[in-house]
Image (tube, rainbow, N blue to C red):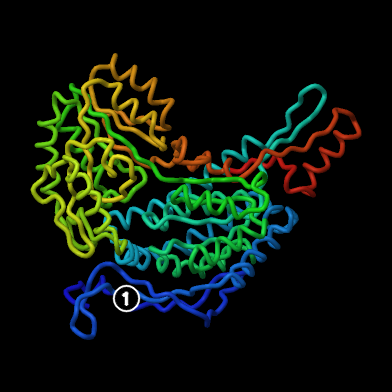
Amino acid sequence: MHNIPENMQVTPIHHASYLCDGAIEPWSGKTAEVFSNIYTKNNNGDYGPTLLGTVPDMDADHALKALDAAYNAFNRGQGIWPTMKVKDRIACLEKFVEKMKPKREEVVRLLMWEIGKNQPDSYKEFDRTVDYISNTIDAYKALDRKSAKFQKESGIYAHIRRSPLGVVLCLGPYNYPLNETFCLLIPALIMGNTAIFKPAKLGVLLITPLLEAFKESFPPGVVNIVFGRGRNIASPIMQTGKVDVLALIGHSSSAVALQDQHPKKNRLRLVLGLEANNPGVILPDADLDLTVKECISGTLSFNGQRCTALKMLFVHESIVDEFNARFAKAVDALPYGLPWEEGAFLTPLPEVDKANYIKGLVDDATSKGAKIMNSKGGEMSHNYCYPAILYPVNDSMNVYHEEQFGPVIPVVPFSTIDQPLDAIANSEYGQQVSIFGRNSEKLGRLIDILANLVCRVNLNSACQRGPDIYPFTGRKNSAVGTLSVFDALRSFSIRTFVASKDNNYNNAIIEELKDTNHSNFVSTEYLL
């Protein structure tokens, strides 16, 4: 490698296996090359994308084999996993976490190379994922403790617990290929579902060090991991009708296309984290020092490649010039570097054509009257685009409507609050909003309205995912279901109960079931 620290260098990983039915199966078929958009010198002395390795490019037949493994492991609710004691499923998750932890350095290094995430955020993603699993286990214990009882209504005793739904197809995103993927996979598994999981095309190699941990921690068929193109794998899987839950973080068009493949859409549970176009609304009395700081983080953390990023800034016309000046200065001061370089905030973009896409948005806006407000704005290379602040932006420009998912920041002036409110109400998205101001009377009115348009209103702070215990969902095209630690357990399960009439005959049977542990479902065991 050229000018790459020794501890950050990578040797191409030619991964040739997949996880199916409790076995790591060898793969000898077609493979797909995995490149990093971080350029290094090749053998000819030319700079270009860095080959990180290869992964299986699997076909429909092998994908369906993995699906059958998940289907048979669930066995219409009769399998070992869905009928297992809660404490035993938890033990499997705990075992997985302990086997996952030693892979930290390897996974983090691949996060940096595959998607260009800086080193602190890469470590944070791994550690946050470990914490998420532990928090999910704690939340499941709490849920189970609340269910460890019988209740009586109208002469009927009921023992109400949550049960799995069946087979889950899990498709995670490239921007958080570990954390957000596991926010789908882990709650699905712990509730007793079985899963077939395909990693995102960017961030695929970093999953490979974990295959052995999955194999050794779960019964055969509970977790099945396949590799390849979505159209070759996900579509045939959905067409079988054997999938009970589609769990996807990505674009709404992908979710709709996959739903349409399912022959019985009425019985398909959806757990979807989709695109957003989160606005920031900056009022005349906003603390500009605080606002600029939060908007830097909100718009440009991980180069703006977050569904929770601030994608549009509505700024009151009385302060817009001052805000633009301060914001432009702060953006131009942001350091660029390779992911492992100390202090690097802006890093190479992982998608091959992303810089050109951003350039197209900038060119379209400037051709329609917007100006680039920061001196470095729009500077670009093959894998990099310096953030561009565009002002004034209006609804004739593409950047006004698109989730740009990258380092371009549209600023829209407004004179009355109805203008940003109408824009948010008319938007196809409804995940979050940030509002910046001090007057509690005005903020109160805004909060009351915005709480009906989005699912999280951030007061003088950037939009964000966590803490994971809080709800994470959206309205309209932004989400279906919710992915907080607490709520995700409910998204991947259904309330089920055993009922019995209050008489001596039934009561004796229930007492015997509790005392003998003949049923894993009927249990008043209190998990500490």
Identified at 13% across, 36% down, the residue is 324
Q: Is residue 133 visible?
A: no
The residue at which mark 1 appears reads as 51
- Between 189 and 505, the one lying in front of the other is 189
Identified at 53% across, 79% down, the residue is 27
Place residue 163 in its image quadrant: top right
Say above or below: 40 vs 401: below
Q: Amino acid at mark 1?
A: Leu
- Between 124 and 306, the one lying in front of the other is 306
Say above or below: 192 vs 231: above
**Left of 201 or right of it: where is 367?**
left
Place residue 6 in its image quadrant: bottom left
Looking at the rendering, in which quadrant would you find the C terminus?
Answer: top right
- Between 358 and 142, the one lying in front of the other is 358
Percent x, y for residue 22? 61, 69
Percent x, y for residue 123? 32, 57
Percent x, y for residue 55? 45, 74
Place residue 276 in its image quadrant: top left
Identified at 25% across, 43% down, the residue is 299
- Image label count: 1
Residue lying furthest top: 441
Percent x, y for residue 249? 46, 50
Crowd tier of the residue under label 1, counting other residues whose Cα lies within 10 Å: few below 14, some 14–19, many 20 or above = some
Say above or below: 331 vs 98: above
Residue lying furthest bottom: 44
Q: Secondary structure at mark 1?
A: strand
- Between 226 and 489, the one lying in front of the other is 226
Looking at the rendering, in which quadrant would you find the N terminus?
Answer: bottom left
Identified at 61% across, 43% down, the residue is 527
Q: Is residue 114 visible?
A: yes
